[in-house]
Image (cartoon, rainbow, N blue to C red):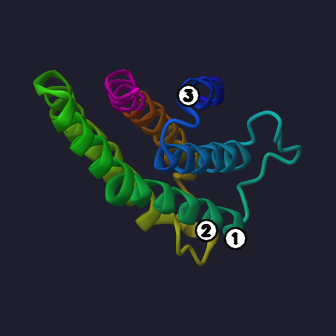
Amino acid sequence: MLSRLEQAQQQWGGSLTAIDNWLTERQDVLVGYCQLAGLPPFDQTDKALPKRNDIQSFCQLLMDYMSAGHFEVFDQVVAQCKKNGPNSLALAQRIYPNIAKTTDFGLTFNDKFADINSDETLDNFDQSLSALGQFLEDRFELEDQLIEALYTNHS
């Protein structure tokens, strides 16, 4: 996921401020995800579950990222795709429902873990985090398709 982000930043960086900001937020989400999951370079030596504050911080990053996508970037991308013709618009209309599914999963993850008060609610945290990682990977791929369509037809 991190290498895909680097490619996206290199390919589309500087093309549109909203996309630049969004890719920066994506990076923040990925770093937070890697920290929670104990992925390199954030290996956890004690293999304990993350601290409540770390989970809450990550959930806030995740919600900020998804909100920016839905309320800022997607509207601009879809509007530009409409201007670029029926093929771009058809792509946006085909991809958007799949992105919405990933948003639903992110919201569910947030609802389950953002306000945890005890270790009891962390029973399935590892499985939920792993599933979230897959949904994020799928989402990033879909978002990149939209950005590519916008970039190709706009630049």
Q: Residues within 10 Å of mark 2 (few under 14, many from 20)?
A: some
Q: Residues within 10 Å of mark 1 (few under 14, many from 20)?
A: few
Nearer to the camera, 136 or 152:
152
Q: Are marks 1 and 2 in contact (CB under 8 Å)?
A: yes
According to the image, label 2 marks what residue? 56
Q: Residues within 10 Å of mark 3 (few under 14, many from 20)?
A: some
Q: Residue at x 39, y 34 (%)?
A: 143
Disc sitting over residue 53 in the figure: 1
Q: Residue furthest right?
A: 45
Q: Earlier in the sequence, mark 3 or mark 2?
A: 3
Q: Amino acid at mark 3?
A: Ala
Q: Please provide percent x and percent y for residue 115.
A: 53, 75
Q: Residue at x 31, y 42 (%)?
A: 77
According to the image, label 3 marks what residue? 8
| Displayed quadrant of residue 82 | top left
Q: What SS does tag 3 mark? A: helix
Residues at marks 3 and 1, CA–CA distance in whole angstroms: 30 Å
Q: Residue furthest left?
A: 86
Q: Earlier in the sequence, mark 3 or mark 1?
A: 3
Q: Is residue 65 magenta?
A: no
Q: What SS does tag 1 mark? A: helix
Q: Please provide percent x and percent y for residue 128.
A: 49, 47
Viewer-nearest of labels 3 and 2?
A: 3
| Displayed quadrant of residue 87 | top left
Q: Is residue 128 above or below residue 92?
A: below
Report the magenta residues as a range.
144-155
Q: Please provide percent x and percent y for residue 37.
A: 68, 43
Nearer to the camera, 84 or 11:
84
Q: Amino acid at mark 2?
A: Gln
Q: Residue furthest front?
A: 155
